[in-house]
Image (spheres, rainbow, N blue to C red):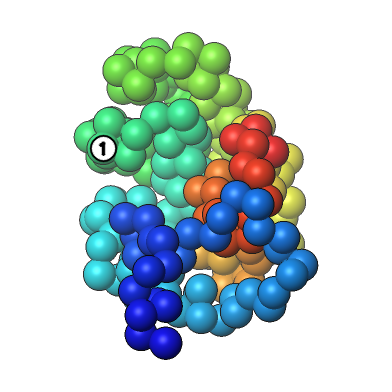
Amino acid sequence: MAEAKKNRPHDKSGLLKRPAHADPSSENINLAAIRTGLLRWFRKSARKYPWRQTHNWFHLVMAELMLRRTRSDQVQSVYETFTKRYKNPARAHGDPDGVLDTIASLGLHWRNQQILDSIAFMSHTYGASTPKEQSDLTEIPGVGDYCNAMIRSRLYGDRLAAIDSNVARIYCRITGVPFHPEM
């Protein structure tokens, strides 16, 4: 038995790699064990980012928008500067040129406009207040199901699955389902 485990392929995270041809229905997948392993790995290996420490809903939305198609290490200093300047959407909405200057180094001009649109919506809808628990955060431009689930779980303790491409990649690796980044 120990020999069989020793010869099983693993990736750098220590999670079992299933062969690409594996049929996900052919064997039971122990999701509880996978969850436990991922949480153990995260506690040991997680990088310290400021958006993981905040409960400011506006800052959480901005982090998610800034992180789109951009490495976390690149976003960190921009996020820190942004959150020191702008505590709520009303304040950021009053300074669109300052917002653009702050996020310019992240590139992706389509995202910069989306951030301004999101700030305008949040400012008009919520002002300096936190959304009520029953608010539909997916109405905010740029906020989809993943971002909504992540924010609701952080703000209100909702038990929602925040499924992003990294989660999908792990699922596909475990089940043998082909991964398509835009799925």
At 34% from the left edge and 34% from the top edge, which residue is drawn?
A: 71
Residue 16 is situated, as x and y percent measured from the top left of the image, at: 45, 65
Residue 148 is situated, as x and y percent measured from the top left of the image, at: 63, 51
At 48% from the left edge and 41% from the top edge, which residue is drawn?
A: 64
Q: Quadrant of residue 80?
A: top left
**From this viewpoint, is residue 143 visible?**
no
**Image height check: is 94 above or below 18?**
above
Q: Secondary structure at mark 1?
A: helix
Q: Is residue 76 left or right of residue 57?
A: left
Task: Characterize the local packing of mark 1: few (<14), some (14-19) or many (20 or more) Cα atoms within 10 angstroms.
Answer: few
Which of the two residues, 183 or 60, is positioned nearer the viewer here? 183
At 56% from the left edge and 44% from the top edge, which residue is drawn?
A: 165
Q: Quadrant of residue 156?
A: bottom right
**Image height check: is 145 above or below 24?**
above
**From this viewpoint, is residue 17 visible?**
yes
At 56% from the left edge and 81% from the top edge, which residue is drawn?
A: 32
The quadrant of the image that shows the N terminus is bottom left
Which of the two residues, 45 or 89, is positioned nearer the viewer here? 45
The quadrant of the image that shows the C terminus is top right
Residue 144 is situated, as x and y percent measured from the top left of the image, at: 67, 42
Q: Is residue 168 left or right of residue 53?
A: right
The residue that disc 1 covers is 73
Residue 109 is situated, as x and y percent measured from the top left of the image, at: 48, 12
Which of the two residues, 35 or 175, is positioned nearer the viewer here? 175
Q: Point out the residue furthest to the bottom here.
A: 1
Amino acid type, label 1: Asp
**Image height check: is 39 above or below 141?**
below
Q: How many labels sit on residues? A: 1
